[in-house]
Image: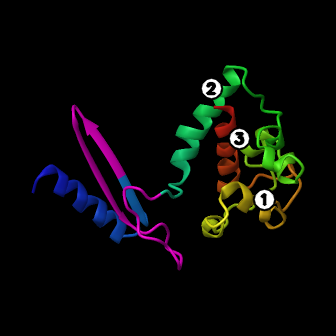
């Protein structure tokens, strides 16, 4: 079995044993590029097949590697401060409850957000408007009162960072 087939087989075995619901792998070495994709965006009903072009939440890796690194860079460069609110950066959220969320609270998982929500409903209107439409259901407590791991908080940070850069 060649290397590509071996990688594909290992990915499929991991998916079939519920190690993850889907995978996307991109590898580049010298001038050769290989991609593998498979599975579904989640184990929940209504999940979509994953291809090389599918965008979906890949879990905590994105938070630690991408979002925190870019946020730290923006702070280091003086482009934003952790005491800024999302509304200072995302115009659509300026006069909303969502716009009052503080970046430091989002970063520390203590912004009062639900830990997880089905994001499929956001596809029709786009993330920014969709999350604004759901702010009453997704902001469930006052900021700083308790820590609750939240994927949504980091997606919100991503929207802020799009405005910064």
Classed neighbour count for the residue bearing mark 2: other residues with Cα under 10 Å, few (<14), some (14–19), many (≥20): few
Compared across the picture, whether 28 is left or right of 1 comes to right
Q: Residue 11 appears at what percent x and percent y? A: 30, 60
Q: Residue at x 61, y 65 (%)?
A: 123
- 94 vs 100, nearest the viewer: 94
For the C terminus, the image quarter is top right
**Element class at badge 3:** helix
Disc nearer the start of the sequence (1/2): 2
Give me the C-alpha separation between circle 1 and circle 2.
27 Å
Residue that carries the numbered disc 3 in the rendered image: 160
Q: Residues within 10 Å of mark 3 (few under 14, many from 20)?
A: many
- Disc 1 to disc 3, C-alpha distance: 14 Å
In the figure, residue 132 lies in which quadrant?
bottom right
Earlier sequence position, callout 2 versus callout 3: 2
The mark that comes first in sequence, 1 or 3, is 1
Residue bearing mark 2: 73
Tell me the quarter of the picture where residue 85 sits.
top right
Residue pointed to by mark 1: 132
Secondary structure beneath dot 2 equals helix
Residue drawn at (82%, 41%) of the image: 102
Residue 78, compared with residue 66, is above or below; it is above
Please tell me how crowded label 1 is: few (under 14), some (14-19), or many (20+) other residues with Cα within 10 Å.
some
The part of the chain drawn in magenta is 25-54
**Residue 48 shown in magenta:** yes
**Which colour style is shown?**
rainbow
The label shown at residue 87 is none
Of the 4 image quadrants, the one containing the N terminus is bottom left
């Amino acid at each position: 079995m060649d290397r590509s087939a071996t990688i594909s087989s290992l990915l499929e075995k991991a998916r079939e044993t519920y190690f993850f619901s889907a995978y996307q792998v991109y590898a580049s070495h010298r001038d050769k590029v290989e991609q593998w994709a498979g599975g579904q965006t989640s184990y929940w009903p209504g999940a979509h097949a994953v291809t090389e072009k599918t965008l979906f939440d890949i879990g905590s890796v994105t938070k630690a590697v991408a979002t925190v690194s870019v946020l730290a860079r923006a702070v280091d460069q003086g482009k934003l401060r952790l005491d800024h609110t999302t509304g200072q950066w995302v115009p659509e959220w300026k006069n909303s409850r969502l716009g009052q969320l503080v970046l430091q609270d989002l970063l520390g998982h203590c912004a009062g957000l639900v830990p997880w929500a089905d994001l499929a409903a956001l596809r029709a209107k786009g993330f920014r408007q969709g999350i604004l439409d759901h702010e009453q259901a997704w902001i469930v407590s006052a900021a700083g009162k308790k820590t609750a791991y939240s994927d949504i908080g980091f997606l919100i940070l991503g929207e802020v960072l799009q405005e910064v850069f």
